[in-house]
Structure formats: C-alpha cells, structure tokens
Image (cartoon, rainbow, N blue to C red):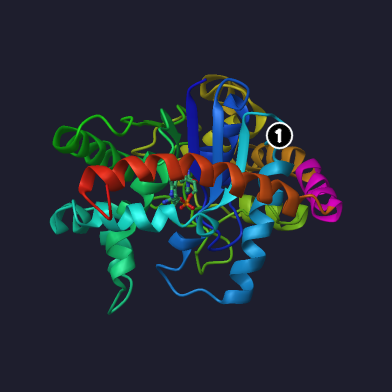
C-alpha cells in the first residue's frame, strides 16, 4: 500500500480551512493508503506558544481528527505526535546542512510570517527542512495539504532528489495532493487572504469547535462585494467564490451545483445556505469530539502511533546516517 502523510499544527483551534485542505482528504483516502497522520508540535513553537495551551491543543487536535471521521481502528492508520519521535529533528538537522539558505528565505510562508514581527527565530527559517524530514522519513507518496503548503512539499521533493543524486536512492520523492475544491478557504473578513488559525479578527475564521450561533454569525457577516451577482470568479469575486467553495466542501456538491442552487438570489440566502451546510456537518462532529475526549482512548492511540512511527523512522534514519558518514560503520 502506498503511503499518505500529513500533519496539522496545534498552534490553535482547527478551522474549516484545515478541514478542507487536510482532514477531509485523509478521511476520503484513508482506506486506500497507509496513512501517517501526526501533530507537528515542533513546528508550532516556531512562533511563541503557551506550554499549557500547546499540550491541550495537541490532544484536542487528535480528538478532532477522529471526530471528523479519521478511523484510528484501521490497521493502516498511524496517529502520532512529532516530538515523540526524535528522528524528525535529527533528520531535519541533516537537511539544514543540505539546503541553501536562500531556498528557505524565499518560501512564501516564511516571507509572510517573518514580516509580521520585528525579529523572528531561526526555526521559522528552517521550518521547511523539518517538514521535509516529517515527510521523507516515511517514504510518503502523497502529502495531502492546502495550496499554502505546496511550496514546502516541493522543497521536500527537491531535497529528496538532490540527496538521492548525491548519496544513492534513499528517499521516495513525494507529491503534494491538493484538493480540487477547498485548497484555499479564505478569511471571511479579508477574502484576499487565506483563513488562518491564528487570526486576531474574531469574525475571520470559523473553527471546527465553534457553536452554531458563532458559525452563523461569522458566515452571515462575511465580506462579499457590491454587485449582487452570484457566480464563481475567484479573482474578481473572492468573497462570494469563497462562500460557494465552503458550501461545496460542506454539502458535498460541485461548485457548478452550488452556483445553480443560489444564482439569481441574494447574498443573504447564499450565506444562510452556507451556514446551514456548515452547521449540519459540524454539530455531529462536535458531539463525536466530546465522546472521543471522554473515551480516554487517545493515549492508547498515540502510544501505538509513537511505537510504529519510531520503528519506520529508525530504519530510514539508519540509512541516512550511514550515507552521510555519521558515527561508526
Ligand atoms: P497548518 O497547520 O497551517 O495547516 C494544516 C493543513 O490545513 C491546510 N490549510 C488550509 N487549507 C485550505 N484553506 C485554508 N485556509 C487552509 N489553512 C490551512 C494546510 O495546507 C495544511 O494541509 N507546515 C504544515 C504542517 C506540517 C505538515 C508536515 C504538513 C508539518 N509537517 C508534513 C504535511 C506534511 C502547516 O503549518 O499546516
């Protein structure tokens, strides 16, 4: 079975964007691939985190994956925490020593995040090397993500190709798996930007854990445009196109069907339809989430994932260690 691998940072509560770009793809493909799904807590500390909140967000993220339909009982499903596997950081260091600095500082995400603060940590620069280690340790064929992570997966591909050329065939060259609908869910207040976990605008992002009232309020106050026409045109009508995309992701219909359903009506009806679809999907997810938290199973799932992921990563790391000349033969 080929492998899928992805991770969602526990840097805050998960959004409907994370669902569209990451979680829903895992749920759709989990029976067809061996799946490695992990919480990149080491990535989260590239920006300051409150330690207590980070612990909590890690467990909450796992419960949310499962509540959304990730099946931890599948034999080919492995769920684990990045920091519980020391090979990720070890391989990341080796990759840092094989990546030109300029390749890291030209990453879109680095440019955007570093511009937000006067100073930033070196971890924000080397972040894509750690992400490459996450992926390449497991010979993943596909990496399901939203469009914002595509450039990082491409850096991992380039590293794998360069490494293989220099040291012999060690890594499988991965491919990004970007959904056709929902690769970039936009900020509800500023549709030029992607929806983000770490927004400071309380109306910008819908979280998977939001109450029905919050969801409806945020979607009803989404920024659109003033021409009053419902059509899918991401460039000229990003707000309306975003609402149609969210409707499509949460109702399961195509963009064409979403347009056909709402065209000719007002933006108010479109927003109400979108809010209904999101609420209908998320209310049962939240019930399930509470059950998962109460079941007390998360530790057991993570113990199994830690053991399995360490076994696979140890084998790959041993190959790399020998190839670069570390330690004894
Ligand atoms: P993160 O935590 O920012 O996002 C998790 C996943 O959600 C997707 N995503 C979106 N998709 C659509 N619309 C949006 N507005 C939106 N916002 C986020 C992301 O593309 C991602 O798939 N670096 C990664 C975490 C990571 C990782 C990895 C992913 C670390 N190691 C190895 C894959 C493989 C990140 O920060 O994602």
Residue plotted at (45% across, 27% down)? 180
Q: Which SS does the magenta portion mostly show? A: helix
Residue plotted at (25% across, 29% down)? 169
Residue plotted at (76% across, 43% down)? 285
How many labels sit on residues?
Answer: 1
Q: Is residue 60 above or below residue 121?
A: above
**Nearer to us in this view, 248 or 153:** 153
Q: Which residue is mark 1?
A: 71
Q: Is residue 246 above or below residue 180?
A: below
Q: Quadrant of residue 317?
A: top left
Range of the magenta residues?
284-295
Q: Secondary structure at mark 1?
A: loop
Q: Can residue 238 be seen from the camera position used here?
A: no
Q: Which residue is farthest bottom? A: 118
Residue 266 picture location, percent across and down: 60, 37
Q: Is residue 233 above or below residue 321?
A: above
């Amino acid at each position: 079975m080929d492998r899928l691998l992805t991770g969602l940072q526990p840097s805050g509560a998960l959004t409907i964007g994370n669902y569209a770009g990451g979680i829903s793809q895992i749920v759709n493909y989990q029976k067809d691939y061996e799946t490695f799904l992990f919480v990149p807590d080491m990535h989260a500390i590239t920006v300051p985190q409150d330690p207590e909140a980070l612990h909590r967000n890690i467990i909450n993220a796992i419960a949310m994956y499962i509540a959304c339909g990730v099946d931890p009982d599948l034999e080919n499903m492995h769920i684990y925490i990045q920091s519980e596997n020391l090979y990720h950081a070890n391989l990341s260091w080796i990759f840092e020593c094989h990546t030109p600095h300029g390749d890291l500082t030209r990453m879109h995400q680095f440019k955007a995040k570093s511009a937000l603060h006067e100073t930033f940590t070196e971890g924000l620069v080397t972040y894509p090397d750690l992400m490459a280690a996450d992926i390449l340790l497991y010979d993943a064929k596909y990496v399901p993500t939203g469009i914002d992570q595509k450039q990082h997966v491409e850096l991992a591909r380039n590293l794998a190709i360069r490494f293989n050329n220099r040291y012999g065939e060690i890594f499988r060259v991965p491919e990004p798996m970007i959904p056709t609908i929902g690769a970039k869910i936009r900020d509800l207040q500023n549709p030029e930007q992607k929806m983000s976990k770490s927004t400071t605008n309380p109306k910008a992002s819908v979280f998977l854990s939001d109450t029905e009232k919050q969801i409806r309020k945020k979607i009803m106050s989404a920024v659109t445009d003033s021409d009053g026409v419902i059509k899918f045109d991401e460039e000229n009508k990003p707000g309306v196109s975003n609402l149609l995309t969210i409707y499509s992701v949460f109702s399961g219909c195509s963009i064409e069907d979403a347009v056909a359903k709402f065209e000719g009506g007002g933006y108010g009806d479109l927003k109400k339809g979108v809010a209904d679809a999101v609420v209908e999907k998320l209310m049962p997810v939240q019930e399930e989430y509470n059950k998962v938290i109460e079941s007390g199973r998360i530790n057991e799932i993570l113990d199994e994932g830690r053991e399995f992921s360490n076994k696979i990563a140890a084998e790959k790391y041993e190959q790399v260690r020998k190839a670069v000349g570390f330690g004894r033969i």
